[in-house]
Amino acid sequence: MINLHFYGAAGTVTGSCYLLDNGHYRILIDCGLFQGSKAIKERNYGPFPFNPATIDALVLTHAHIDHCGLIPKLYLGGFKGPVFATPATIELAAALLPDSGHIQEMEVERKNRKNSRAGLPLLTPIYTAAQAAECLQFFQSLDYQNEREILPGFRLRFQDAGHILGSAIAELWVKDGAEEIKITFSGDLGNPGQPIVKDPTPIESTDYLIMESTYGNRRHNTQGDKIELLKEIINKTMKKGGNLVIPAFAVERTQDLLYYLNILLNQKAINVDNIYLDSPLAAAATDIFCRHQEYFDAETKELSKDGACPLFLPGLKISRTAEESMAINKIKGGAIIIAASGMCDAGRIKHHLKHNLWRPECTVLLVGYQAAGTLGRRLLEGEKRVRIHGEEIAVRADIISLDGFSAHADRDGLLKWLKSCGSPPKKVFVTHGEEEAAKDFAALVTAELGVPAEAPQWLATARLLPAKATLSSVLPEAPAAQVAAAVEAEAVYQRILVQLKAMVDAGFANHDYGGVQRKLQQIAALLNHQI
């Protein structure tokens, strides 16, 4: 029996983490940071709902922090195995993870200054930059379309997910006794037609599919050419005399913006002398992109055929130090400021928002997904006052969202990719979406393809049967009473899972991490005794 556990990106967009267990080996697919509301982010600080020391290997679909951001914590918890990823993902993770550790150190240092003054307990970061750098030695490279046995009974192949540089769809063939089941994890699927990266690769077939649904019940707003809309926003803001502040993910979104800004500058469609990239991480990521032009799509390769990387603009100002970043805040108008984080919840962007949000001549341009509970989502939903670094800030700047820059496929793009696959899967598990989006897309999959689909909850477990197995084929000689008993046992099993989830949720809500860990250990001991 193969069990699939949903330990992240279930009922939420972030915190991607799935555990596959075939009774002999246990592997994780992704181990990401939770982002969003305070309650969701609290999951980052408690114990894992599994023992990291029991995990044999990890498969990483791509380098975004909500997919890789808890890998250092996994090693600190006792994980000793390899991490398999594409070459570009490994290079990007080598920049992203230490940066994540540094941000956590800075945030904890700031909070501890307040806690010290208030006589409250001091906090510790989830991991430090040094601890993040240390775990990178365990990463192992596997390029697209190369199949490899990563553990006895586990074969892995990556396909291009078209989301960011190096992003992958993970195809896993897993032994279940004499049978073999194919389980595919879509990772994050790219928006077709985006610059730089190629479109997502269709898969031939799979028994089970775990599929993202970030925009599972939405179409991207594509009214008008996005490069034309970007030009209009820039020129309008410059005419008002303000700054254009763009919160952007350091990987992919920033590079897309640089690509389009380069085109607009070459066309002389905009006249902006001060374009700032205020993110050492984004600058490092851009260097990595330019070193891996073999992954670029045909259109981007055409732009770089003279040897120059199309992601570096003439006159682009890159701020690497804190002092250079702070100096930007003295500029009152005529500047484009690109900084992370893309959801406005951490990093240098918060300082730029603090200095520009209250000014009606300025514009804040949101070009990425904004998770529920984040500062970016609150701005998108029209909040008129927000708190940044303990200070109340009035929102008078124009807040504009451009969906066309999304690196995620929308509802139609997701469905088109699924239909382009060679044959429909036995079952689809819809994850990596807010609860409503995931459920809506699961219903759409069933309606359009006739395939069973469900949106599992956090901490749920699914039992994956061999491709041809049914209840009667598993128990061919079983009388009706035994079949009924098996069905009842499965129902009891599912009710217990619901109760366990409620217990763990309550523990996290009350910050009783030690209590949650003790209860999980007790349950594990009981199960081992029964087995």
Image (tube, grey):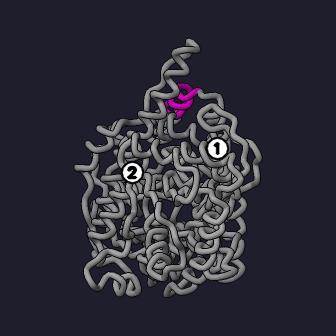
Does 100 sit above or below residue 265? Answer: above
- Tell me where the magenta segment starts and ends, as one range: 512-522
Q: Residue at x 67, y 82 (%)?
A: 224
For discs 2 and 1, the disc positioned in front in the rendered view: 2
Q: What is the three-letter code of the residue carrying label 2?
A: Ser
Q: Where is residue 325 in the image (x, y as percent from the top left)?
A: 44, 45
Q: Where is residue 36 in the image (x, y as percent from the top left)?
A: 61, 47
Nearest to the observer: residue 431 or residue 228:
228
Q: What is the three-letter code of the residue carrying label 1?
A: Ser
> Dot 2: within a 10 Å radius of its alpha carbon, few (fewer than 14), some, or many (20 or more) residues?
some
Q: Does the magenta stretch include residue 513?
A: yes
Q: Position of residue 321 (x, y in %)?
A: 36, 44
Q: Residue at x 32, y 50 (%)?
A: 56
Q: Residue at x 41, y 77 (%)?
A: 196
The image quadrant that residue 508 belongs to is top right
The secondary structure that dominates the magenta segment is helix
Q: Where is residue 484 in the image (x, y as percent from the top left)?
A: 68, 60
Q: Which mark is residue 103?
A: none
The image quadrant that residue 229 belongs to is bottom right
Residue lying farthest to the left in this orientation: 137
Q: Is residue 51 magenta?
A: no
Q: Which mark is residue 319?
A: 2
Nearest to the observer: residue 63 or residue 390:
390
Can you identify the residue that label 1 sits on? 37
